[in-house]
Image (spheres, rainbow, N blue to C red):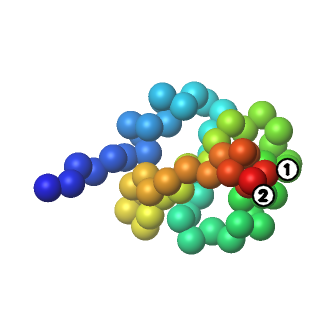
Amino acid sequence: MSATLMVKDVHPIHGTAAVTVDENALLKSVISIYATNPGIKGIFLTDAQNRFTGMVSRLAIQK
């Protein structure tokens, strides 16, 4: 049995400097968010039911 992890459960751990985007968003869109918002610490990926599916960090993009 898998547990459902909601964005609201993860976001407070990470802090307020985070954004959520659809998990199918283009990488170009994610890079644009980071480029135009230097204070953002992380971008959370969510599915159609707004469930947390992953995270894209600045470091991951740099690699």
How packed is label 2: few (under 14 Cα within 10 Å), some, or many (20 or more)? some
Please name the residue that numbered disc 1 is placed on: 35
**59 sits to left or right of 5:** right
Q: Residue furthest front?
A: 63
Where is residue 36 drawn, in percent x and y? 85, 48
Quadrant where the N terminus sits is bottom left
Q: Residue at x 49, y 36 (%)?
A: 11
- Relative height, residue 24 to residue 55 (above, below): below
Q: Residue 31, which numbered label?
A: 2
Kind of residue indicated by mark 2? Ile
Q: Residue 21, which numbered label?
A: none
Residue 33 seen by the camera: no
Q: Residue at x 54, y 31 (%)?
A: 14
Q: Are marks 1 and 2 in contact (CB under 8 Å)?
A: yes
Q: Residue at x 66, y 46 (%)?
A: 57
How many numbered discs, if any? 2
Q: Residue furthest left?
A: 1
Q: Residue at x 68, y 36 (%)?
A: 41
Kind of residue indicated by mark 1? Ala
- Relative height, residue 57 to residue 27 (above, below): above
Secondary structure beneath dot 1 equals helix
Secondary structure beneath dot 2 equals helix
Asked which quadrant contains residue 22, the reply is bottom right
How packed is label 1: few (under 14 Cα within 10 Å), some, or many (20 or more)? few
In whole angstroms, how far apart are the C-alphas of marks 1 and 2? Answer: 6 Å
Where is residue 49 drawn, in percent x and y? 38, 62
Residue 22 seen by the camera: yes
- Relative height, residue 21 to residue 41 (above, below): below
Where is residue 63 drawn, in percent x and y? 75, 53
